[in-house]
């Protein structure tokens, strides 16, 4: 049976050939993989070194195997799915139902036939099958090598107990098995590869490959995605020898890679000083930046932990190290990972065109924002379609190569990590560790990157455990990483460094240096801890004033207003923020100068309020505009916006958050102001508090920060020190709360402390349970199948699921429409995220509106998996652009589950 009688891709026959023959599609994908694994590429060299194969031998072996990725399509069950017109193809067999995907059927055919194919020479070479004992090892080695190829649709597959006779015809006159064998034999002869038999039977080599198999799987998936694009690979159903089609496939693959930005990595250039980044301006580097400029880079993967105060230039120091690492061949690109979408947006704006300075002027590095709401970032949307200097001229209805590349990468968040330079949430990177479909594509993208993680202290135990595993894996893949923080506990720094060392196959270590600021460098047989100095202008001292009632907090705010100052009150829960806002609007002489900012706004209003905050309190704001401004906010204020206030009130929070909040207090130079003072609303001090100590004063706060010992220890150290002095007392502040201080905790708070320790242990266990066993390789393990539906697992462990609620309204003629109708991206701008218990308090959509809602869902993809809320039909809960979502009066605003954003 000729393999030219099998289709690989099919389409309606409205133009040209209606199908693409299977052998040609297989070679298209292999041709893409051929170029992506060119011997001079860093990825090929890294894999070559770790697998002890020459780059050329490695390429030929893996590309041969990649050409087998769709062996399952030789199944007559698959062939019966379509009957493309104008092509002579094998007839369907009715009894063969297509009940299993072709990727799994490929693994089945291989499992059934490889020994026979090896013996008759179809697999190339003339090596005899090894003795039975080694044959099992060979089978295991081949299974490991083929798993990334058959698993090219986003997760590994396994043949299990399937029988080939159910899906493949082996009739002597029409044998699918024989057609597949002929294709394999001709392809093996064409590609001229050699089996590394000594390595395939080596358990040690197999373990090494399994560690790298996630990256290989990402390479195979990317090759399949690009090689399946009809814009680049025209369908062909004319029979020709594979040797004649292979040059055609290579030519098309080369053009496809050019248009999608993968033809060649951008060319890095050596770091030449800050002046080279900023148009020749004379800029004096900060002490941290200077150390980043002069420190000696080690060999191989390296971890850098940069600890310094706000304003010390940590981002620029990270960029200096990143450019030096790129120029030294330690990566091809950069990914900046941040804790939230808001901080990601801010970093994307901040980098601007700076990332282009890392590369030669002739390079056009792709630059992509990666998070769920990135389409709402105007800068990103414009950049996706923007032309760059050097783009060739195109017809008015065509796109430049840069535009095509940017749009292709931006088409899916799964692709975002493939960009040369990416900015996004840490979640996009952590998803590579979890059983999400196509997670290997994320790991493949990261394997080529310098991974920069900002605010590394901001993650809970669940995310911290995942981050440790990500660092372990990144080190094993040969990548480098830079971590940024202002408030990192010593124990967390040791855990991060030890995770990196484990990835390098070295023992964990004990870090000794307690200085702050500090740069820590960890590599193979390399550990350096470098204490740093601080510029006087960023050293800060913030005084502390203690408040014990909300009335005192209100009076403090109004006193600042009467003095002509601007003031912020950062509350720990949304409900507390709304209540304070209501009271201050009644007291303020100009209520328009009061602003409320929290997470329970529809995105359209949240964006408006963010812009309003920046206009009133941002760096360019004038003294007249700032006078008497009051901002009542939650933690969203401290996370992202580059603004500052003259006076700040804050609910009591853990010390690292208070330090972060204080960073928005008199952040910018504005002439003469009184000494910065942080007024903290907290319970009256007690040396021996009981379990209700915090709840009596701040019930909402206790619902958010359940380990009340952290709050008491924070109050203790601030009372002892009398203020926040950075950097001089940074270590003391953090270690007095997060260090070995269990003996200081009063008996009345011990139960809450141990309860939270137990919950933290559960979080660590959940992270370890949810994360893929990367050391076991890209294989399906039937005895413990970790692959699940994406909705069942997440990068963050939450007490309660969240729901995306879509705000709806009626038009004058009674039609159902989106809250932000008329706006670009109205479907996303009309949404607000609520906890499930909160969403359940909203009124159900009236039954007579259901069909209109379904019509909206058909129109807007962004409305899938959302809950509709017709605001005007709700008699209990309300929404207002100034207040956000106000839940019914019977909502437990003070009890369990109050949210902090």
Image (tube, rainbow, N blue to C red):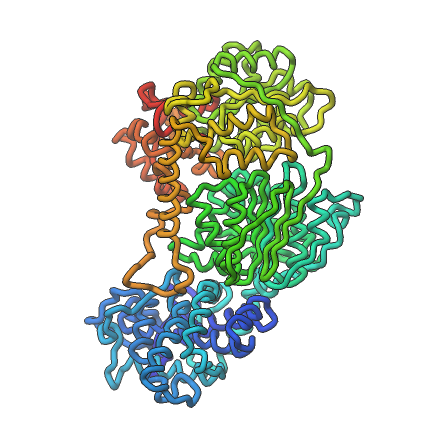
Q: In the rendered view, tell whether residue 632 sits above or below residue 704.
A: above
- Furthest residue in direction left, as rendered: 95
Q: Is residue 403 visible?
A: no
Coordinates of residue 512 in the picture (x, y in percent): 59, 48
Coordinates of residue 563 in the picture (x, y in percent): 64, 12
Q: Nearer the viewer, residue 482 or 377?
A: 482
Image quadrant assignment for residue 567: top right
Coordinates of residue 336 in the picture (x, y in percent): 57, 48
700 on left or right of 511: left
Q: Nearer the viewer, residue 540 or 275?
A: 540
Q: Is residue 489 visible?
A: yes
Coordinates of residue 743 in the picture (x, y in percent): 45, 34
Residue at (51, 54) in percent of width and height: 498
Looking at the rendered image, the quarter that the N terminus falls into is bottom left
Q: In the rendered view, tell whether residue 142 sits above or below residue 280.
A: below
For the image, the number of numbered tags is 0
Q: In the rendered view, tell whether residue 89 sits above or below residue 14.
A: below
Residue at (50, 38) in percent of width and height: 739
- Furthest residue in direction front, as rendered: 743
Q: Nearer the viewer, residue 568 or 74?
A: 568
173 on left or right of 394: left
Residue at (38, 26) in percent of width and height: 748
Q: In the rendered view, tell whether residue 53 sits above or below residue 477.
A: below
């Amino acid at each position: 049976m000729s393999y030219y009688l099998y289709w690989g891709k099919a389409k309606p026959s409205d133009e040209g050939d209606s199908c693409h023959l299977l052998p040609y599609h297989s070679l298209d994908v292999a041709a893409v993989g051929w170029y992506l694994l060119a011997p001079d590429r860093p990825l090929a060299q890294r894999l070559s070194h770790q697998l002890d194969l020459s780059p050329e031998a490695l390429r030929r072996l893996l590309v041969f195997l990649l050409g087998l990725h769709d062996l399952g399509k030789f199944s007559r069950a698959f062939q019966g799915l379509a009957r493309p017109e104008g092509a002579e193809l094998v007839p369907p067999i009715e009894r063969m139902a297509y009940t299993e995907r072709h990727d799994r059927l490929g693994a089945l055919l291989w499992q059934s036939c490889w020994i026979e194919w090896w013996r008759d020479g179809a697999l190339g070479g003339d090596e005899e099958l090894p003795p039975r004992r080694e044959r099992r090892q060979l089978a295991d080695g081949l299974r490991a090598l083929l798993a990334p190829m058959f698993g090219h649709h986003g997760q590994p597959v396994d043949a299990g107990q399937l029988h080939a006779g159910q899906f493949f015809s082996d009739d002597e006159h029409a044998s699918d098995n024989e057609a597949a064998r002929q294709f394999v034999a001709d392809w093996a002869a064409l590609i001229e590869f050699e089996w590394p038999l000594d390595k395939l039977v080596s358990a040690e080599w197999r373990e090494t490959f399994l560690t790298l198999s996630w990256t290989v799987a990402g390479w195979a998936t990317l090759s399949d995605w690009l090689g399946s694009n009809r814009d680049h690979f025209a369908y062909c159903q004319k029979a020709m020898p594979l040797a004649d089609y292979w040059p055609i496939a290579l030519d098309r693959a080369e053009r496809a890679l050019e248009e999608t930005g993968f033809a060649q990595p951008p060319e890095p250039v050596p770091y030449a000083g800050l002046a080279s980044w900023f148009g020749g301006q004379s800029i004096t580097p900060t002490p941290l930046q200077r150390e980043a400029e002069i420190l000696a880079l080690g060999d191989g993967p390296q971890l850098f932990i940069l600890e310094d105060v706000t304003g010390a230039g940590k981002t620029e120091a990270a960029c200096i190290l990143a450019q030096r690492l790129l120029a030294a061949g330690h990566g091809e690109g950069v990914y900046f990972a941040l804790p939230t979408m808001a901080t990601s947006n801010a970093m994307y704006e901040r980098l601007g065109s700076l990332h282009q300075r890392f590369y030669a002027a002739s390079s056009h590095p792709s630059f992509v924002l990666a998070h769920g709401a990135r389409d709402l970032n105007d800068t990103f949307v414009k950049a996706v379609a923007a032309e760059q200097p050097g783009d060739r001229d195109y017809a008015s209805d065509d796109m430049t190569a840069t535009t095509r590349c940017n749009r292709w990468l931006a088409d899916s968040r799964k692709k975002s990590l493939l960009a040369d330079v990416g900015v996004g949430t840490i979640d996009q990177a952590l998803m590579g560790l979890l059983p999400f479909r196509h997670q290997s594509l994320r790991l493949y993208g990261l394997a080529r990157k310098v991974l920069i993680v900002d605010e590394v202290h901001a993650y809970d135990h669940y995310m911290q455990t995942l981050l440790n595993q990500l660092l372990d894996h990144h080190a094993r893949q040969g990548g480098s990483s830079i971590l940024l923080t202002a408030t990192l506990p010593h124990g967390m720094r040791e855990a991060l460094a030890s995770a990196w060392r484990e990835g390098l196959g070295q023992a964990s270590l004990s870090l000794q240096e307690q200085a702050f600021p500090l740069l820590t460098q960890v590599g193979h047989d390399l550990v350096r801890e470098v204490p740093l100095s601080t510029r006087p202008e960023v050293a800060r001292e913030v005084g502390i004033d203690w408040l014990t009632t909300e009335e005192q907090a209100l009076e403090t705010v109004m006193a600042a207003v009467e003095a002509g100052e601007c003031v912020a009150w950062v509350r720990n829960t949304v409900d507390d923020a709304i209540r304070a806002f209501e009271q201050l609007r009644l007291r303020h002489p100009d209520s328009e100068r009061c602003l409320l900012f929290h997470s329970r706004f529809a995105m359209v209003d949240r964006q408006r309020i963010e812009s309003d905050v920046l206009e009133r309190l941002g760096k360019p704001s004038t003294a007249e505009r700032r006078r008497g401004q009051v901002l009542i906010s939650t933690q969203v204020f401290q996370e992202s916006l580059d603004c500052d206030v003259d006076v700040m009130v804050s609910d009591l929070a853990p010390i690292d958050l208070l330090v972060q909040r204080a960073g928005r207090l008199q952040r910018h130079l504005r002439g003469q102001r009184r000494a910065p003072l942080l007024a903290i609303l907290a319970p009256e001090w007690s040396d021996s508090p009981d379990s209700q100590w915090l709840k009596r004063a701040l019930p909402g706060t206790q619902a958010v920060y359940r380990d009340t010992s952290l709050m008491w220890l924070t109050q203790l150290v601030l009372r002892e020190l009398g203020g926040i002095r950075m950097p001089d007392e940074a270590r003391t502040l953090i270690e007095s709360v997060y260090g070995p201080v269990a003996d200081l905790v009063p008996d009345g708070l011990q139960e809450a402390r141990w309860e939270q320790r137990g919950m933290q242990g559960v979080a660590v266990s959940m992270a370890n349970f949810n994360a893929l066993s990367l050391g076991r390789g890209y294989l399906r393990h039937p005895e413990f199948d970790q692959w699940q539906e994406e909705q069942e697992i997440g990068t963050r462990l939450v007490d309660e699921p969240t729901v995306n609620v879509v705000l709806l309204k009626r038009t004058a003629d009674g039609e159902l429409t989106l809250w932000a109708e008329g706006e670009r991206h109205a479907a996303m701008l009309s949404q607000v995220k609520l906890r499930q218990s909160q969403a359940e308090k909203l009124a159900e959509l009236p039954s007579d509106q259901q069909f209109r809602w379904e019509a909206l869902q058909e129109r807007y993809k962004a409305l899938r998996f959302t809950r509709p809320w017709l605001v005007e039909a709700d008699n209990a809960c309300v929404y207002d652009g100034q207040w956000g979502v106000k839940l019914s009066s019977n909502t437990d605003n003070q009890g369990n589950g109050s949210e902090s954003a």
